[in-house]
Structures are given as structure tokens and as C-alpha cells.
Image (cartoon, helix red, strand yellow):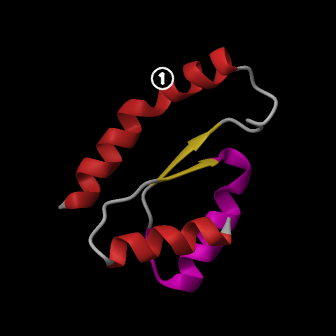
Amino acid sequence: MSCSVHDLAEYESHGVPSVLVATEQFVTATAAQSRILGTTPAVVYVEHPVQNRTHDELHLMADGVVEALIGALITNQT
């Protein structure tokens, strides 16, 4: 998770609006890394785990968060 938060902070520092997608298991780790880096990333959490999901299940999961992702990107641009 720490690499993802670092990457997001780097993108944001270059003016690239970004949203981190992580599973709910990483809420605490994301918060800790964000505090350490002094950043407040836009994050959308999905159910854990994802690695054993079928393509159809992943598509449903993505459909369930696409509006939140778009909203976070739009909000993060201002």
C-alpha cells in the first residue's frame, strides 16, 4: 500500500489528478502512509479480496464504484 500512496502523491505533485483504489483491508495502512507523507489522497475502497473474483464479479465491483471514482477525480482537480 505504501507504494500506491507514494505514487499517488507523486502524480498529484505534478498536477495529475489521481484516485487510489484499494480494498477495505487497507484503510488503516492508507491512512498511516498518508499521514507520514503529509498528503490527503482521494481514495475509493472496494470489497476485499479481489484476486479470486471472476471477470463478471470484477465488472460489477467496478460498476459499483465508477461514479465515486469520477467524482473523486473531478473534486480533486479543483
Image quarter where the N terminus lies is bottom right
Q: Residue at x 57, y 21 (%)?
A: 59
Q: Nearer the viewer, residue 78 or 18?
A: 18
Residue 44, compared with residue 30, is above or below; it is above
- Percent x, y for residue 42? 42, 58
Q: Is residue 27 magenta?
A: yes
Q: Residue at x 52, y 70 (%)?
A: 7
Q: Is residue 59 left or right of residue 76?
A: right
- Percent x, y for residue 10? 43, 76
Label 1 belongs to which residue?
Answer: 63
Q: Is residue 25 magenta?
A: yes
Give the magenta part as a residue range: 23-40
- Indicate the secondary structure of the residue bearing disc 1: helix
Q: Is residue 68 left or right of residue 15?
A: right
Image quarter where the C terminus lies is bottom left
Q: Kindly report the secondary structure that dominates the magenta region of the rendered protein.
A: helix
Residue 69, compared with residue 64, is above or below; it is below
Q: Quadrant of residue 41?
A: bottom left
Q: Residue at x 30, y 65 (%)?
A: 16
- Percent x, y for residue 32? 64, 74
Q: Is residue 65 left or right of residue 59?
A: left
Please tell me how crowded label 1 is: few (under 14), some (14-19), or many (20+) other residues with Cα within 10 Å: few
Q: Nearer the viewer, residue 3 or 30?
A: 3
Residue type pointed to by label 1: Asp
Q: Quadrant of residue 9?
A: bottom left
